[in-house]
Amino acid sequence: MLIAGFPAGAWGTNCYVVAPAAGEECVIIDPGHQATEGVEETLRKHRLKPVAVILTHGHIDHVASVVPVCGAHDVPAWIHPADRYMMSDPEKALGRSIGMPLMGELTVGEPDDLRELTDGAELKLAGLDLTVAHAPGHTKGSVTFTMPESGDVPPVFFSGDLLFAGSVGRSDLPGGDHAELLGSLARVCLPLGDPTVVLSGHGLQTTIGHERATNPYMRQVAAGQGAAPAPRRGM
């Protein structure tokens, strides 16, 4: 398994390129602000051919490079329908203007081929098996992607801005809902096995076991209580 990740742009959003091995087909997860160069460098380094872009949610820091990446490689993008409007109207999703200088660097809009994700869908792309889970709370259309254990590689959980190392995503932007986010933690994250590797939208790699033991939100959700305060990230 090859997973190459890098933080991109003004928000340090993690973009991931995932393939069975070097020299094969791949998927690209969350090519956000200023991610295009990093994507192309990763593809060249590992001799990869993209077949799709998949998106954990529609915030501009996760989708800003979708149009150029899809256009350059003639591949579709996938997003949950509840977040599709953000592709063409990112400022509405933020509840404010993100500023003309920044907007001048972005290519907003939908790629030529935009497909919709559904809860429980099984995506078979580039020789990979990815299970989609609808996980609202950060946005209405937030999703996660889980890959099963393969040989010596434990399950991998792409959590987007639902779960971070030591924290969770913010829920104070349009479409966010703290109660929904806690429900998504309980329904999507808690059932995962402790060895599951968590690759989130921002910050460092962690595991479900570590977060179950130390993350105040996971601990309190597991106990059936409201979540305790903790630093939150994500746009």
Image (tube, rainbow, N blue to C red):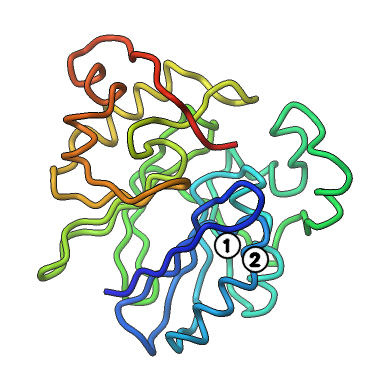
Query: Considering only vertical position in the picture, is 142 above or below 30?
Result: above
Query: Considering only vertical position in the picture, is 18 above or below 93?
Result: below
Q: Position of residue 181 (x, y in %)?
A: 42, 25
- Tally the numbered discs: 2
**Residue 179 picture quarter:** top left
Relative to 26, is 21 on the left or the right? Answer: left
Quarter of the picture containing the N terminus is bottom left
Contact (Cβ within 8 Å) of mark 2 with mark 1 = yes
**Residue 139 picture quarter:** top right
Q: Amino acid at mark 2?
A: Asp
* Distance of label 2 from label 1 (alpha carbons): 6 Å
Q: Amino acid at mark 1?
A: Ala
Relative to 205, is 201 on the left or the right? Answer: right
Q: Position of residue 80 (x, y in %)?
A: 53, 45
The residue located at (50%, 34%) in the rendering is 233
The disc, 2 or 1, on the residue closer to the chain's N-terminal end is: 1
**Residue 96 picture quarter:** top right
Query: In the current view of this chain or complex, which residue is farthest to the left?
Result: 152
The residue located at (69%, 34%) in the rendering is 93
Q: Position of residue 40 (x, y in %)?
A: 58, 78
Query: Considering only vertical position in the picture, is 170 above or below 123?
Result: above
Relative to 81, is 137 on the left or the right? Answer: left
Residue annotated with mark 1:
77
Q: Nearer the viewer, residue 8 or 175?
A: 8
Residue annotated with mark 2:
113
Quarter of the picture containing the C terminus is top right
